[in-house]
Amino acid sequence: MATETFDVVVVGGGPSGATAANDLARNGRSVLLLDKAGRIKPCGGAIPPRLIRDFEIPQHLLVARITSARMVSPADKEVDMPIDPGGYVGMVDRDVFDEFLRERAASAGAVRATGSFEQLSRDADGAAVVEYRTKGDSSDAPLQRVRARLVIGADGARSQVGRQAIPGAENVKCVFAYHEIVEAPRGQVPKYDDQRCDVYYQGKLSPDFYAWIFPHGDTVSIGTGSMQKGFSLRGSVAELRKATGFDRVRTIRHEGAPIPLKPLKKWDNGRDVLLAGDAAGVVAPASGEGIYYAMLGGRLAAEAAEAFYATGNPASLALARKRFMKQHGRVFWILGIMQYFWYSSDKRREKFVKICEDKDVQRLTWQSYMNKELVRRDPLAHVRIFFKDLAHLFGFARA
């Protein structure tokens, strides 16, 4: 029998789960944060200024400050997109960043447990029971069991909590991402800039997504992603490293994982289970950005949990998805269309990179990314971009 009951058991200690646990613990809720040990998600590690502000991220966690991006076309045309003077995008190492968030939750009162989620069951009263296995336990050892008034599944793409509790969660559409963490070059890579992210829109490196080189201070993340089965992600990264000179530097580690690119239609079971972060599918299409949306999803899950406790109405759990989609649903829709259209061929990728030369495009892109909202000011800039896009689509613009 389960021996302990928590207001909330959060399964998954990434940015989303740790944020939910922290917010709920600060509100006085009893929280168990269950996380696997040693798991590092493949991630470029970029966090925008709004995340730093909204979630009070200390500056010492930033291993680099990015002041520009370089877009590289299939024909190796390079387009630089500088951020306005004084602005920057922070870069974090996920192993250190995620542990900071988990420790912050523990400092707020959450109980940490290290283990692997196995199954969600019910006790005689119908209450949720989370069953998990701790590291080192044999397969026939009894599972650890805790009761929960509410379970938040923040256990990543293809969430086991979601698969067991929420119909349709197993059908999430994913890109599989792979990256290698390497030592930062010391003169071996002439084009490398430790304040610039390089993004490669080339079909040979990804037939339907992109490849990247992102600085991380003393290290560099080099990766790619694709939904195409059989496409060699390792081979793609090896090719990119050879082409850029990064094959000369030492590889520290490598990671791979699925990344969802479309929010699930339902995040809760209408009773006592709620998904957040990658488990809910909140990674931005086209860009693959997930840390900000994961942390926002964790915060909204905590707010929905509080509404659930206050009203006793399970319908309150649906507030998490409703509020998220109200804030960011339109952005996800636009980015989804952009990925479907512009990433579909090298001819279109070439035009897409060409569009990135436009100063209006650069300014509005950075403003939207940095502040996490569509820029509604300067309508004339949007009109100019619209007609320039049409010119590229119909071949009137120079390639």
Image (cartoon, grey):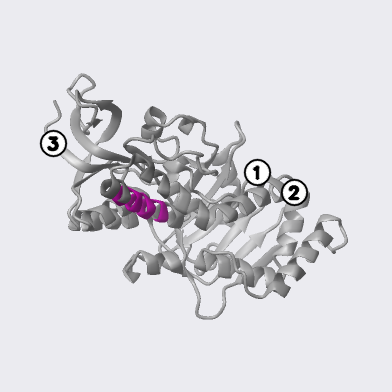
Tell me residue 43's x, y (percent).
46, 51
Secondary structure mostly seen in magenta is helix
Relative to 269, say whether 203 is above or below: below
Q: Residue at x 68, y 66 (%)?
A: 79
Identify the residue under disc 3: 4
* Mark closer to the observer (3, 1): 3
Can residue 290 be seen here? The reply is: no
**Magenta-drawn segment:** 296-306
- As drawn, the label of residue 387 is none
Q: Amino acid at mark 3?
A: Glu
**Apparent side of residue 104 relative to residue 78 in the rendered image (left or right):** left
Residue extending farthest to the left is 3
Do residues under tags 2 and 3 come within 8 Å of each other at their CB atoms? no
Residue extending farthest to the top is 140
Marks 2 and 3, the one that precedes in the sequence: 3
- As drawn, the label of residue 346 is 2
Identify the residue under disc 1: 208
- Magenta segment includes 373: no
Q: Residue at x 24, y 36 (%)?
A: 115
Residue 135 location, quadrant? top left
Marks 3 and 1, the one that precedes in the sequence: 3
Q: Amino acid at mark 2?
A: Asp
Mark 1 residue element = loop
**Apparent side of residue 348 relative to residue 55 in the rendered image (left or right):** right
